[in-house]
């Protein structure tokens, strides 16, 4: 089993609970786990302040120009409130 994407490569990912595909970049290829069916990658979207760990099967190659992706809104961290 090998990684489908390279570090720095643009990929599409749909965050859980959202219906819009977002543009992300792979930041790191996670170490292989002994009995895991899928490899994991760490990805990041430009507007989000954090990175996400996702399964490789949840990603696909970015096929559209960057300007065609909806900008994802940064989520508030748990426990924070809007004023």
Image (spheres, rainbow, N blue to C red):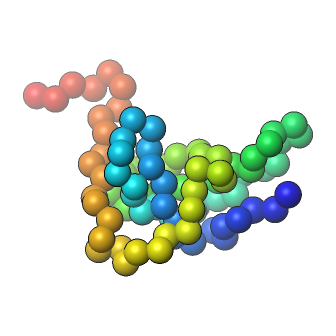
Question: 5 or 21, which lies in front?
Answer: 21
Residue 32 locus on image (x, y percent): 82, 48
Residue placed at 30% from the left, 71% from the top?
68
Q: Quadrant of residue 53?
A: top right
Q: How many marks?
A: 0
Residue placed at 21% from the left, 25% from the top?
81
Residue 25 locus on image (x, y percent): 51, 64
Residue placed at 81% from the left, 39% from the top?
36
Quadrant that contains the C terminus: top left
Residue placed at 48% from the left, 54% from the top?
13
Extreme right residue here? 34
Q: Is residue 31 left or right of residue 66?
A: right
Q: Is residue 31 left or right of residue 22?
A: right
Quadrant that contains the N terminus: bottom right
Extreme left residue here? 83
Q: Is residue 17 above or below residue 2?
A: above
Residue 72 locus on image (x, y percent): 30, 53
Extreme top residue here? 79
Question: 69 or 26, which lies in front?
Answer: 69
């Amino acid at each position: 089993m090998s990684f489908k994407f390279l570090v720095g490569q643009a990929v599409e990912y749909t965050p859980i609970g959202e219906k819009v595909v977002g543009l992300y970049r792979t930041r790191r290829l996670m170490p292989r786990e002994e009995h895991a069916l899928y490899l994991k990658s760490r990805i990041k979207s430009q507007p989000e302040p954090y990175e996400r760990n996702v399964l490789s099967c949840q990603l696909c190659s970015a096929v559209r120009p960057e300007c065609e992706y909806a900008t994802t809104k940064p989520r508030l961290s748990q426990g924070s409130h809007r004023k």
